[in-house]
Image (cartoon, grey):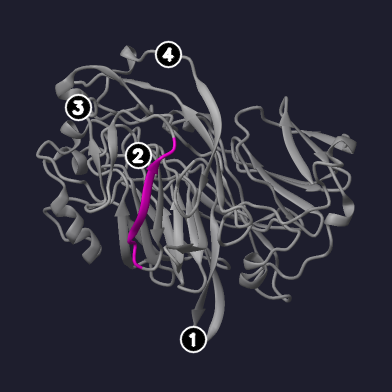
Amino acid sequence: MIITFLRYSLLMTLACSLLPAQATVNQQTIANPQSQWLSYGRDYQEQRFSPLAQINRDNINQLDLAWSFKFSTARGMEATPLVHNGVIYISTGWSHVHALDARTGEQLWHYDANVAKSHLAKTCCGPVNRGVALWQGDSGAELQVFFGALDGRLIALNATTGTENWSVQTTPTDGNYSITGAPRVVPRVVNGIEKGMVIIGNGGAELGVRGFVSAYDIKSGEQIWRFYTVPGDPNKPQESPALEAAVETWSGDYWYQNGGGGGTAWDSMVYDPELDLIYIGTGNGSPWNRELRSPGGGDNLYLSSIVALQAGSGDYVWHYQVTPQDNWDSTATQQLVLAELEIEGKPRSVIMQAPKNGFFYVLDRISGELLSADAFTHITWASHVDMQTGRPVETKYADYQSFGSTYIWPSPYGAHNWQPMSFSSKTGLMYIPVQNIPGYFSAQDSVVYRVDRWNTGLDLNESRDPKELGCRQSLHGRTGLR
C-alpha cells in the first residue's frame, strides 16, 4: 500500500491482499503488527520500516490510482495514517479525524473537535496534527481512537462510529499550550490485570510554557501520572527528586516567572515493553536566548534531552542531554528509534535519534550511556561531541550574543525535524530526511513575556532567508558513518 498527499487529497494504490484481518489491538499486536500499521511509528520500536514485499522495484510501475479523498481542511498534512482491518484512521489539521475504507476510499465517519480558530495564535507552526493512536486491550473491549486536539484536549473516540467517549483538558487554558503530536498507548498492570494508558505531551515553547508529559486511563480519561520536563519555582518544593536535581542547573528568575522555561515534548515518544520504559524527547528552552532564560548559566535540565521514565509511574530513570545550554531552538523531540545492534562485538539494546542539532546519537537504552554521536549534515554551532564528557564542543559562532549576529548551521528548522526517518535492520542503515538550512541569529537585550506571541529573545525581524537545500541521508546504525 502506498499513500501520498497531493493538493490536499489522499491518493492510494492498494494491493487488497495486504489487508488481512488483524487480531485485537493491544501490546502483542502493536509489538508485531505484521501487515498492519497500528501505532505512530508502526510498532513499539518505531523503526518505520515495512516488511511488506509484494510491491517492489520490479512492479512498482504497474501501480495506478485506485481512489482519492479530499479532506475538509488544507492546513498542514503531517499525520501518519494507521491501518487496522481494512480501515484507515487519519487526523488532519484543525483536529479532524477521519475513518476511511482502505479499499474504496469511502468515508466511514468524520470527527471535528471544533477547535476555536483563535487558538492558532498559540501555535508554533500551524494547526497541524501528526496522528492518532489505537487500543482495544482484549477482544471483548471496544476499539478506541485517541488523539490530541490543538487546544490541549485528549479525546477518545469509538473506532466504529467516531462518537466521542470522553475528553479531558490536559493543558492549562490560560497560557500558550497546544498539542500537535500523536499520543501513544502502552499497557499497565493494576492488581494483576493489564490495562492501558494514553501518553500525551504538548507544545508551546516558542511562546513560553512549562513542558510536561501525562498519562491517562484509556477507559475513563483519569490522569495517572505527570512528569514535568523542567523545574518550577525554585522557592517551592519540586514535584519529584529529578526536578530537585534539575533546579540546580537553572539560574535567574525569568524562566519560571515568564512562561515556564520550555522543554515541551511535542512529538517523539517510544515505549520498550521489555524494560517497561517510556522514552521522551524534550524541546527547546524558552526563550531561545539562554542569557535571558538563565543568565547565570547552567545546562537547564531537562531541555533538549532524551529522558527515560518508568511507564507505570512516570518516575525518572535516566537522561541524556543532546544540547546542553540550548541557545538555538535545538529540540530533541525528533523521532526516537529502538533497535538491537552489535557494537564492538557485543549486542546492545540501543535508542537512536537524529535531532535538530545535526548530530546522530546512539545510546544504550538501558543505562543511557552514549555510544556514538556523529554529524549527519553541515554544522557550525559545534565542532564535535566529546565522547569522554558526552557534551558538544561549541564553536565561537554558537555564542551569537558575544560573537555578534550571524548565520549558524543548522537553523531553528533543524537538520532533521518532525519528518520521520526509517531504520532497516536488513541494511543496518538509518534513512533520514535532512535539511541543510542556516539560521540568522540576532540576540535581543531583553524579552517581555506575552501570551499568544513568540517570546524567543531573538530579533526575528533580522532573519535572513537563504536558499533551502533538502536531501536524504543514510547513516550506519552501529557507527553513525555515512
The answer, for residue 445, to whether it is visible in the render is no
Q: Nearer the viewer, mark 4 or mark 2?
A: 4
Give the crowd class for mark 2: few <14, some 14-19, many >=20 residues within 10 Å: some
Using the image, tell me which numbered label, if any, was put on residue 191.
1
Instruction: Using the numbered discs, state the Cα–Cα distance from disc 1 to disc 4 in whole angstroms.
Output: 57 Å
Using the image, tell me which numbered label, if any, was put on residue 281.
none
| Image coords of residue 308 (percent x, y) | 37, 62
| Mark closest to the chain's N terminus, 3 or 2 | 2
In the image, residue 28 above or below residue 353? below
Local SS, label 4: loop
Question: Tag 4: residue type?
Answer: Asp
What are the residue bounds of the magenta stretch?
Answer: 367-376
Instruction: Using the numbered discs, state the Cα–Cα distance from disc 3 to disc 2 in whole angstroms.
Output: 36 Å
Local SS, label 3: loop
Q: Which residue is mark 2?
A: 175
* Residue 91 horizontal side relative to residue 421, left or right: right
Magenta span main SS: strand
Give the crowd class for mark 1: few <14, some 14-19, many >=20 residues within 10 Å: few
Give the crowd class for mark 3: few <14, some 14-19, many >=20 residues within 10 Å: few
Local SS, label 2: loop
Q: Which residue is mark 4?
A: 465
